[in-house]
């Protein structure tokens, strides 16, 4: 700037000129600097996200190790961990390993160990499952689709077990399969209420309607699993009669 008002005028003219289309030739240099800064910032954000993702993975792996190890001595620990995760609000869905731990317990246990029932005499170094408790937890946190998935998983596993297991599992010997039909009825009615309310409401958006449609689909899967379960009960009646005859022989 050359002193006085003249200098200020030239400075202002220079500013206007720099920001006008007349200075298009000067554009590439600042643009390249901005682009370079944007790339550096994007790279920094990407690295920060990668570090956070790695930390989250390591923390979850550590949680899995401790939960699995201490669930042997501390009954119900897996369900308590699941409850704490859902209450935190940071994670909308439970990790698969935790859901399977709550539903099936130790893999060393018999695959057909009473469905939703607890084992009265757990084996040594085994983890006791609590699928009914997991269902109640999902219902408490309004995750009705996840609760339906628990029913489907437990009943489907029963159907996949060998039919030969029937001969070694007699009710009079303490082998009782428990299914919380009242809890399943409540779940069914809650989903029906949500569906009815959504249909009657004109203000429901497409996202809500899509979520309800997905929820109805999961309930239908639960109904199919129940139908197969009741069919298997009728078929197994004949097997139980034969098993009793063999056990009394």
Image (tube, rainbow, N blue to C red):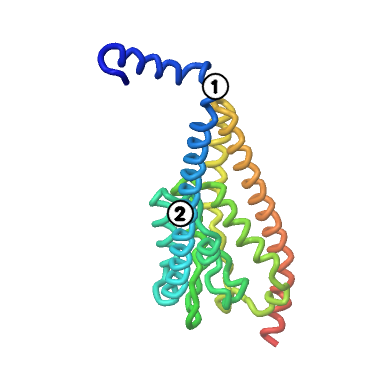
22 w.r.t. 61: above or below: above
Residue at 46% from the left image edge and 19% from the top image edge: 19
97 w.r.t. 145: above or below: below
Nearer the camera: disc 1 or disc 2: 1
User: From the viewer's perspective, is 234 left or right of 219?
Assistant: right
Residue 236 coordinates in the image, percent (x, y): 71, 68
Please tell me the numbered disc located at residue 128: none
Q: Badge 2 is on which residue?
A: 137
Residue 109 coordinates in the image, percent (x, y): 57, 76
Residue sitting nearer the eye, 76 or 120: 76
Residue at 55% from the left image edge and 60% from the top image edge: 96
Q: Badge 1 is on which residue?
A: 24
Residue sitting nearer the eye, 125 or 227: 125
Tell me which label, 1 or 2, sits earlier in the chain.
1
Rounded to the nearest whole Å, what is the CA distance between mark 1 and mark 2?
64 Å
- Badge 1 element: helix
Q: Quadrant of residue 25?
A: top right
Q: Give the quadrant of the N terminus.
A: top left
Q: Give the quadrant of the C terminus.
A: bottom right
Residue at 68% from the left image edge and 74% from the top image edge: 166
- Badge 2 element: helix
231 w.r.t. 174: above or below: above
Q: Quadrant of residue 244?
A: bottom right
Tell me whether the residue at label 1 lies in contact with that at label 2, contact meaning CB atoms closer than 8 angstroms: no
């Amino acid at each position: 700037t050359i002193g006085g008002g003249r200098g200020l005028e030239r400075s202002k003219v220079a500013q206007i000129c720099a920001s006008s289309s007349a200075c298009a030739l000067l554009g590439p240099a600042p643009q390249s600097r901005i682009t370079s800064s944007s790339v550096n910032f994007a790279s920094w954000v990407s690295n920060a996200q990668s570090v956070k993702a790695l930390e989250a993975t390591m923390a979850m792996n550590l949680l899995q190790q401790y939960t699995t190890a201490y669930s042997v001595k501390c009954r119900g620990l897996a369900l308590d961990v699941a409850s704490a995760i859902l209450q935190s609000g940071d994670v909308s869905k439970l990790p698969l390993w935790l859901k399977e731990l709550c539903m099936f317990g130790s893999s060393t246990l018999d695959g057909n160990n009473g469905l939703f029932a607890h084992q009265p005499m757990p084996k040594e170094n085994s983890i006791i499952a609590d699928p009914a408790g997991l269902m109640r937890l999902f219902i408490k946190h309004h995750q009705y689709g996840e609760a339906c998935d628990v029913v489907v998983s437990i009943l489907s596993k029963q159907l996949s077990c060998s039919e030969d297991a029937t001969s070694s599992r007699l009710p009079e010997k303490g082998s009782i399969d428990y299914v919380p039909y009242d809890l399943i009825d409540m779940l069914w009615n809650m989903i029906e209420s949500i569906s009815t309310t959504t249909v009657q409401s004109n203000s429901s958006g497409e996202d809500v309607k899509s979520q309800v449609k997905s929820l109805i689909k999961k309930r239908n899967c639960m109904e199919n699993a129940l139908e197969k379960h009741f069919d298997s009960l009728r078929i197994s009646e004949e097997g139980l009669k034969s098993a009793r005859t063999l056990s009394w022989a």
